[in-house]
Amino acid sequence: MKEYRLETVKPFESKPASLEISVFLPVFNEEDNIERLNIRLTDALERLGRSYEVIYVDDGSTDRSLAKLRESAMRDSRVRVISLRRNYGQTAAMSAGIDHARGQILIPMDADLQNDPADIPCLLEKLDEGYDVVSGWRKDRKDTWLTRQLPSQLANKLISKLSGVQLHDYGCSLKAYRRDVISDVKLYGEMHRFIPIYAGWAGARVTEIPVTHHERRAGKSKYGLERTVKVLFDLITIKFLSSYLTKPLYLFGTAGLACLVISLFSFAFSMYYRIVEGVHLNRMPLATLSMIMFAMGVQFIFMGLLAEMIVRTYHESQNKPTYMVREKINIEDAEHE
């Protein structure tokens, strides 16, 4: 019997790409879809004539998904299986797939058969045009309009506006990445949908193409309206990281100065009413507001200073650069003793 064991993976960027394509799929309670999915994937990938692997990440399934994945891996050595100890969520499962991938091109997709493996050649053709990221767009989406499509459309418009990366569908898992554009991306929360944004900030060429979206035939959807709330919180994080990661005092300092200005005007009006109208300060909300806003302003500024020190520790302790280079011409890296 084939032995399955936990393994320690070296950092993603330290592993050379030994295959052309890596397809990785988070799996959670999809036992009824796995066999058909694997057949369709194998058919689509073999037609390409390229070396490939398929990585299934079992995210703590409680049905027979892992057993079926083991059977698929025993029949085909190109099928690899990672079993997580418990259900960590789609983002963590995606991260595990990226960490274990050996391909030059990485293609994530869902395991519920709503994504169509037949679209993979189209993604690769678009990459061959010179793009670094090709994102799938479920233009004719087969989901409930009110609870799935409408919140998704609103969120996509908001994400595009705030991030500056114009895509119609961030939630579609079917995408294609060149290995180097996500080598340094670390995923948390529901951040897997924002990988094109990270790549775009790093100078990657990002585009999208319409892809097929099927109705779910078996199993149950793992997502509801509560996912929209999580995405909104993650979007706030994205906006902060994009605009203030290296200068957090600009954000906290602006909020602090705004509070101090409100405090100053409140104090001025309260003094006017005290001197001119003879109203006692303990009867004026403006006096209380002035003190509260002054304290908040000072706190915001000090929070900004603390954030500045944390950011410097983050970059300097790990030797993280504050910029990324696309290309060097007639420039040689200096070697330091």
Image: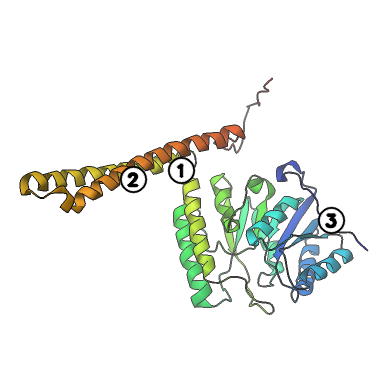
Which of marks 1 and 2 precedes in the sequence?
1
Q: What residue is shown with label 3?
A: 5
Q: What residue is shown with label 1?
A: 244
Q: Which dot, 3 or 2, sits closer to the camera?
A: 2
What residue is rendered at 29% in x and 46% in y?
Answer: 293
Identify the amino acid type marked 3. Arg
Answer with the quarter of the image where residue 91 lies. Answer: bottom right
Res 166 visible: no
| Place of residue 230 in the rendered image (x, y in percent of width and height, measured from the top left) | 52, 62
| Place of residue 6 in the rendered image (x, y in percent of width and height, measured from the top left) | 81, 54
Q: What residue is shown with label 2?
A: 296
Which of marks 2 and 3 precedes in the sequence?
3
Residue extending farthest to the right is 1
| Place of residue 57 in the rendered image (x, y in percent of width and height, measured from the top left) | 74, 61
Identify the amino acid type marked 2. Met
Identify the amino acid type marked 1. Tyr
Q: In this view, does 301 lie to the left or right of 121?
A: left
| Pointer 2 with pointer 1, Cβ within 8 A | no
Name the quarter where the C terminus is drawn.
top right
Name the quarter where the N terminus is drawn.
bottom right
What residue is rendered at 48% in x and 72% in y?
Answer: 150
Q: In this view, does 44 lie to the left or right of 303?
A: right
Q: Which dot, 2 or 1, sits closer to the camera?
A: 2
